[in-house]
Image (spheres, rainbow, N blue to C red):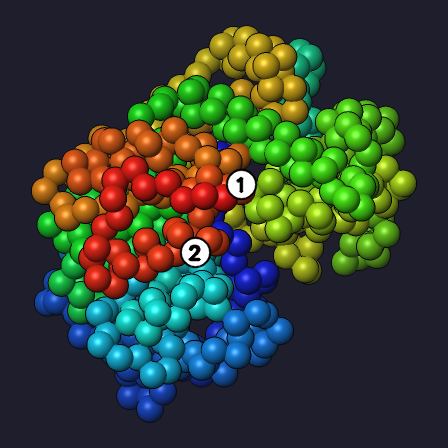
Amino acid sequence: MRHHRGRRAVPAILLALGMVLAGCTSFADSPAEEASSPAATTTVAAPDVAEIEWNDCDAQIQPLIADQPGSDRDLRFECGTTEVPISYDEPEGATLPLFLVRAVLAGQTDRIGSLLVNPGGPGGSGADAAIGLALTLPTEVLGRFDLVGFDPRGVGLSTPVECISDETKEQMIASEPRPVTDAQLDEAFALAEEIADGCAEEYGDALGTFNTVDTARDMDRLREALGDEQLSYLGYSYGTTLGSTYAELFPDKVRALVLDAAVDPDGDATSDAEQSAAGLEAGFDAFATNCVGLIAGCPIGGDPRAFVNELLAQAATTPIPSSEPDTDGQVRTATPGVVLTGIVAALYDTASWPQLAQALAAARQGDSAGLFSLADSYAGRLEDGTYSNLFDANIAVNCADTDETVEEDRVRELAADWNTKYPLFGAGSAVGLYTCSVWDAERTPLPERDAEGSDPIVVVGNAGDPVTPLPGAVDLAEDLENGVLLTWQGQGHTAYPKTDCITAAVNAYLINLTAPMDGLTCPA
């Protein structure tokens, strides 16, 4: 399973938002009643595009962000729903609903239009991202754009694909993260087959409708419904795949696309998995170097890699208890799978490195609560012990987007090879290739993406990105006919708006359509 998630959203916002909106009269009533409500507005769409029914949900969202940095901004939030075709082969046929959030900063002047955002995944909530980014994006941008995030088809509150039980998700996280023995590999293959069979049984032929190509088509419907002649878009990680697919399908509708932390469009599934393992290894080494160099000393000693290997062995012998019980009062215990998932989660953002170091040190002393906190955020585990549909959507979309298969024997070979080359993350990355090989659904492979005829598209890469390494951004910028590469020599996943140089270049592009010089490199 490949997670290409970008910026982290405000924790648990979408869950809480879904709960409060479910109890709101304006969302429970019929569309006709919504439209007549003083709190409801309608965006007038093109004749063949469904309108967006907007409702004021500021009173529901503001309490959820009250303690977050940036919550003192004068923001107003609206929540919307619209309909898109289930199949674009039958655009007048059955539809599915999409959920949106729009954030508007008070005092907007010279409004350009809407800036559509996607946080990555696949499986990340764009509605959640709009709320989080409204607190963090430069006010220069928010002063010119409405910020709009939508949950892609199958994600969050947009007809979520749900075919993996919470118990199975717990099993996925707890399972052996470095399977190399025959028994470990057999168990991993059996779990992948169980998931594939369950989802095929639950959805049948409809399972293949959750794909990136159709989501890109949905985006063009949203653009029209929002009243924009061309699309302005900010996509992180997997969001770069979605954005570049949109540009390929609708090059003349591109106004400004920022594709940050680009997923490599040129590699096959095997090379992508190996690149992911290598990137995570490099990311861990960067974390280790930083930790060892701390003036106050590294909480996990002078050899963090050796420390982690010893901790994994400890967890394999006796899973490490957490001081924070589960919702039912039961003690949670961390297996090696939980330990490594927590590490992966922290490598996305350098701001999480101190938390990771402290969590690893605490686990060695017998308390895995910190590692569970990291792992839960990565896996979409909610405070009530249930899970979001992040895993379900991630697998469904990734597998619908490719018709590649990797046979079991080949996976076994790669697991052995990569376990040597990439000792923390190699075997797990190899076994992940089997997931889509047994997936039983219609496939809609991603197109080659040159976006011929589009206006300039800015591709942002990060020299120290452990999740989508820099070569992916280089390849995407080269593939796009009018791609412009912008590089940050920093660490962590994604770059905008983390540093002044990147921020200034992206702001100028989004607002004034002034693309940076191709190849511009910003210092760490």
Determine whether the residue tagged by mark 1 lies in a helix, strand or loop: strand
Q: Viewer-proximal residue, 218 or 509?
A: 509
| Mark sitting on residue 500 | 2
Q: Residue furthest bottom?
A: 38
Residue 423 position by quadrant? top right
Q: Position of residue 46 (x, y in %)?
A: 12, 67
In the rendered view, does 475 fall on the left or right side of 174?
left
Residue drawn where x is 25% and y is 44% of the image? 517
Determine whether the residue tagged by mark 2 lies in a helix, strand or loop: helix
Residue drawn where x is 21% and y is 36% of the image? 480
At label 1, the amino acid type is Gln
Q: Viewer-proximal residue, 371 or 400?
A: 371
Residue 165, can we see it?
no
| Mark sitting on residue 505 | none
Residue 109, can we see it?
yes
| Mark sitting on residue 491 | 1
At label 2, the amino acid type is Asp
Q: Within 10 Å of the Cα at label 2, are there few (<14), some (14-19), or many (20+) other Cα atoms?
A: few
In this rendering, is residue 135 above or below 363? Answer: below
In primary-sequence order, the first of circles 1 and 2 is 1
